[in-house]
Amino acid sequence: MSETLLKINNVTKVFGTHVVLKDIDLDIVKGEVVCIIGPSGSGKSTLLRCINFIAPPDQGEIIFEGKTWKRFHSRFNIFANRKYEGELPRLRSEIGMVFQHFNVFPHMTAVENVMLGLTKVRKEGRAKAREIAEQSLIQVGLGDKLNQYPEKLSGGQKQRVAIARALALNPKVMLFDEVTSSLDPELVSGILDEIRRLAKDGMTMVIVTHEMNFAFQVANRIVFMDEGRIVTMGTPDEIRNTTDPRARAFLSSILG
Amino acid sequence: MSNSQPFFDFAPIWQSRVLLIEGFGIAMFSAVAGIILAIILGLIIALMRLSRFKILRGFAFIYTQLFRGVPLYVLILWIYFGLVYAVGIDIPRIPSGIIALALLNSGYLSETFRSGILAVSNGQREAGQALGLKGWQVARYIILPQAGRIVIPPTGNQFIDAIKDSAILSIIGVPELMKVAQEQANLFYRPFEFYTVAGLLYLVAVLIVSRGITALENRFAKYSRKSGSSENSVVTTATTDASH
């Protein structure tokens, strides 16, 4: 067994009175591609957001490269709160994330979108940052769109900008949150191909997706979630032949 | 009006032209200084209103309610006469007027800015955080530039209001356009001429400012116009999808 890169320990997340995630444990090994599947509202996206503390877990911890990250909040010590929040960017800068709705910055050109993290987080000079950003955009096939504003780009192209923006920072793990769900059908396969390319390059990835064929093809491991819990997980073959009734019901409803 | 005099006698206006232009200059200076201060104060108050600290939120709320809720007339009298009377702080006429304009307009602008900031989709903040940007960097490089574009038209409106509101500074004797017009009108017994010319001068100033605002909007339009609405539709779905 190779080394564990990311450990999700006993994570619970609550929105109001609604328990979205309940005692989630998941270890992710370096170079592994984990696909998380399950019905809407099962907590897949929230789990992904807990990993980089965009939605900090209410209980439990994330261990990333041996360092433990826990939510911290003091009602009285605002300096301690500030210190905690000041640390989070360090974790996040090692984790790339791509969103369902792209979230590209509309006031910046494609290349500026990618440069922002390089200049402000990685502290690269502008010339170096531009070079890396251009390289990154060329990689995802946008070499001819460097200076376009997102408004002029298709959904698929915006998502490529978002992928390039995350990859440019050279993250140790990539999180994909239903990245093809708001794309026109003809644009989906292009984005999935980008992810396959990353898998081939050995990138560690956690992918929340509704594209079952893709998940079974690209994943080393598939995690099936329902109602805030991990119901079952295993290799694509194991999940395909699972005996778990909920997983079977879900898969047959999707795969027919 | 006697029949021997022309309906609109331009001669007294021409005679008072230097005073009128000076008054116009003071009016514009007060309005511009007032709105610049109001933008700075309004932004600070808006950020306080969105702060996670209850004390700052509370202060900002009271500030906004107070300065939006009190007539400019009263505000000016408070600052020019009231402060001397109450605590012995004596502020000269023009600064008093500028402070009053700044406070009033910052009350309105803080709400404008707050809504502008809230109009930027939550996904934008999340994307910035996910890159590893610090909180202030997300605000500085992602949220505020987008909010800034949104608030240009309403801020321009506020500027136009401030130009016209500057006429009220005449009550504490600031020699701005309205005050000059009043005095000259009494001197020459030609109120119609002087007030009409004063009105036209305000109108000209407002038209020039409007042109400026449009130019500013167009400068930012290179990435907006259409995308504004489509990005907004993304906002609602992004927030409702957060629990998936």
Image (cartoon, rainbow, N blue to C red):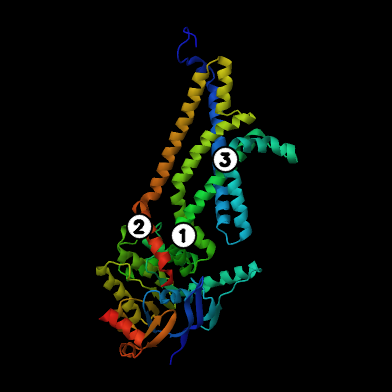
Q: Check disc 2: other Cα within 10 Å, few if <14, some if 14-19, many if 20+.
A: few
- Residue A85 drawn at (x, y percent): 57, 69
Vertical order, A75 against B213 (above or below): below
How far apart in space, not on screen, are marks 3 and 2 (Cα)? 36 Å
Task: For marks 1 and 2, give the CA distance.
Answer: 18 Å
User: Which residue is nearer to you in this view: B111 or A166?
Assistant: B111
Name the element at disc 1. helix
Q: Amino acid at mark 1?
A: Ile
Q: Position of residue B55 (x, y in %)?
A: 64, 58
* Residue pointed to by mark 3: B34
Helix, strand or loop under label 2: helix
Which numbered disc flags the more N-terminal residue, 1 or 3? Answer: 3
Residue drawn at point x = 44 percent, y = 57 percent: B120
Q: How would you rate the neighbour count of disc 1 (Cα within 10 Å): few for under 14, some for 14-19, many for 20 or more? A: many
Q: Chain of mark 1?
A: B
Q: Which residue is mark 1?
A: B142
Looking at marks 1 and 2 on the same chain, the residue that comes earlier in the sequence is marked by: 1
Q: Position of residue A81 (x, y in %)?
A: 61, 69
Badge 2: chain ID = B
State the residue position of label 2: B230
Same chain for the residues under marks 1 and 2 in the image: yes
Give SS at disc 3. Answer: helix
